[in-house]
Image (spheres, rainbow, N blue to C red):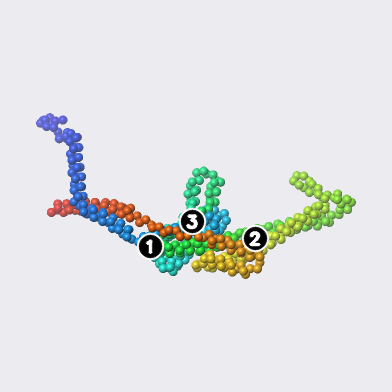
Amino acid sequence: MTNSQSGVPNSQSVPTNVQAEANTYEDEIYLIDYFRVLWKRKYLIVLGSVLPALVVGLILFFSSRNYTITYVYDVKDQGFYDVKDQGIYDVEDQCIYRFYDAENMDRIVTKLEANGLNKYAKLISTAGTREDLRQLVSFEVLPPYMGLFRVKVEAADPDKLERIRQLKAQLLKVTMVAGPKKDIREISLVIRDNIENVIPVYSAEEGIINTLRGYKAEMASIEKNRFDLELVLRTNKAVLAKLKNIKIGALDKNEGNVTLQFDVSDRSEYLPLEYQIQATESKIIELEGQVAANEEKYTYYKDLLTLNGKLLAELKKNTSSHYTIQHFHSFLIDLVDGYKDKELKDYLSSYIKKIENRISVSAPVTERPKASPVPRGVTKKSTIVFAICLMISVFAAFLSEGIEKGQARAL
């Protein structure tokens, strides 16, 4: 479109391609300016990014290295489970929970200080949470219960889920991290001693507590049934006395033909009197035997309660100190010699064998596992530092260029 008076083209009607070329030219100028700034400040950018990454890499490379050592314990049906059929990985409750208990941590701290490992004793003492403690010692139960549950839960079969719930752990991995290399060996001995010799004392204590509950339940059952048994016994004795007082001659001269009626289900049957007397006498003898057996059991359970009470008192008295399963075993040996009653002596002997079995299986699968260095991650960490410092250096380069131009304009 042209101006009607002069015939000169209108400035607003400049072709679009000409404007696009102008914008592209301006963008190219701006990009060249950016590269000029980067080239001008290349030393700042290089030193600001490469130097920090190099320093971090050298520090990581020459710093003292941590080492890891892992002990693997076979915990399936080898004494780690003191409560029968408890299910769902008893080892997590009986070992791991007890290990991280504050009282047990204090015991480990004392042991570490006695061995000159004050650095790690302080690390445990100042740990605020269990996660902090896992930086030094961590546990892993294999196979993981929750992993198995996720695999099977799609089936939605109650029977399968119940079988999974009753699964017990196969292995227990205990991993320790420390440095230098000589320290990890000494620390592992302290941790091993605690897991293999001290933690079983807690398991023994829990086992005795559950045993006491079982015997108390048995005694309560005997006490509950005592009245019913004695009532049935008295009733049968009264029936027998009346049967013997029946005048047979008044009914029939032939004694063998005298019968008594009794009901069986929905029909009536007849039993000769002499057989009825014999049956009642047999029932009385059976009931008297059952009453006598229950009383004997009650007395035996009462003695076992007293005995297990002594064992529990011994453990509770010493668990705050460095009391080991071997100390408890020695106590049991001395105790069994003082008992004359054969039943109690047999019970103690059986319990001692159980403790001996627990001691014998507490060693790890590999007695001396290899101490492996923990990867420092020099390349990865240096790359991260380089990337961060590069961005900061580029920003600093443009910032300094802007400040310089501002000062030049001011002059």
Residue density around tag 1, few if under 14, some if 14–19, many if 20 or more, within 10 Å: few
Labels 2 and 1: the sequence-earlier one: 1
Mark 2 to mark 1 CA distance (whole Å): 58 Å
Badge 3: few (under 14), some or many (20 or more) residues near its Cα, within 10 Å?
many
Query: For residue 206, which quarter of the picture?
Result: bottom right
116 left or right of 231 in image: left
SS at badge 2:
helix
Image position of 261 (left or right of 179) = right
Residue on which the image places disc 3: 172
Can residue 87 be seen here? yes
Counting residues from the N terminus, which is met first, the one under dot 3 or under dot 1?
3
- Residue indicated by mark 2: 219
Instruction: Mark 2 or mark 3: name the one nearer the start of the chain.
Output: 3
Q: Is residue 383 above or below residue 24?
A: below
Q: Is residue 345 above or below residue 140?
A: below
**Marks 3 and 2: in contact by CB < 8 Å?**
no
Q: Position of residue 292 (x, y in %)?
A: 71, 61
* Between marks 2 and 3 in the image, the one whose residue lies nearer the viewer: 3
Query: Could you tell me if the residues under marks 3 and 1 are in contact, i.e. CB atoms within 8 Å?
Result: no
Q: Badge 1 is on which residue? A: 180
Q: Amino acid at mark 2?
A: Met
Question: Which image quarter is the N terminus in?
Answer: top left
Which label lies toward us, 3 or 1?
1
Q: Secondary structure at mark 1?
A: loop
